[in-house]
Image (cartoon, helix red, strand yellow):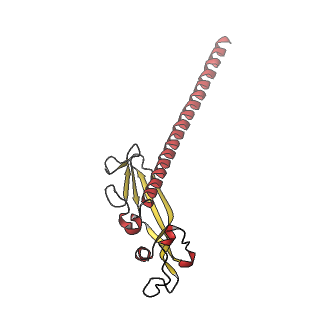
Amino acid sequence: MRNLQRGATLFITLIMLVVISLFLVSALNTATTNLKVVGNMQARNEAIQVAQEAIETVVSSTLFISNPSNAVLNPCGSANTLCKDFNLDDTTSTASALYTTQLTPNPGCVAVRAIKNSELNLAVTEDLGCAAGQSQQFGVSGAVTGDSLCSQTVWEITARTTDSSTGASVTLTQGVSVRVSADDASASCL
């Protein structure tokens, strides 16, 4: 009887060892999966940050109004392309770029509205520059319609960022309202 008990103890011990091993393998697989998920989330969040920064860089200059097909001051490689290296610093080299952001499609004016002279506050310098003189009715743009020399435009800027090491890709679209001269509005916003 004693030998049978030793055999049963050994058998139960082996079964427990297999069950514990299965739990460990399962825990290892779960931890590995979680690490991949967190890494993917980090790559996506960094790509979102880079795309947002690219949009802010484009909006901070007026190039996107005057030349939407070349709206980036110092492009990386081709027009409307920005690159960031491993430290998230700007780079003009596509070889050292970790993140590449392209404005695609080109920034575009999606809405335009002429600002009426009656809407202007002449105490504000920006509004004063838009005012059309009332005594200059002949030959002045907007004199008959009551339009000022400025228009309010709405632009849509889309940035697509790709991470060269992970393949993470993010596309952000942002609208921005910009006051421009009536001449620029008629040239840029059809």
Name above or below for residue 112 compared with residue 174. Answer: below
Q: Residue at x 47, y 47 (%)?
A: 46
Q: Residue at x 48, y 50 (%)?
A: 49
Q: Nearer the viewer, residue 176 or 78?
A: 176
- Residue 70 locus on image (x, y percent): 35, 64
The quarter of the picture where the N terminus appears is top right
Name above or below for residue 14 compared with residue 51. Answer: above
- Residue 189 locus on image (x, y percent): 44, 75
Q: Nearer the viewer, residue 137 or 108?
A: 137
The quarter of the picture where the C terminus appears is bottom left
Q: Is residue 181 left or right of residue 124?
A: left
Tally the numbered discs.
0
Residue 46 visible? The answer is yes
- Residue 155 locus on image (x, y percent): 48, 68
Q: Residue at x 48, y 55 (%)?
A: 52
Q: Is residue 9 left or right of residue 141?
A: right
Name above or below for residue 72 compared with residue 110. Answer: above
Residue 106 visible? The answer is no
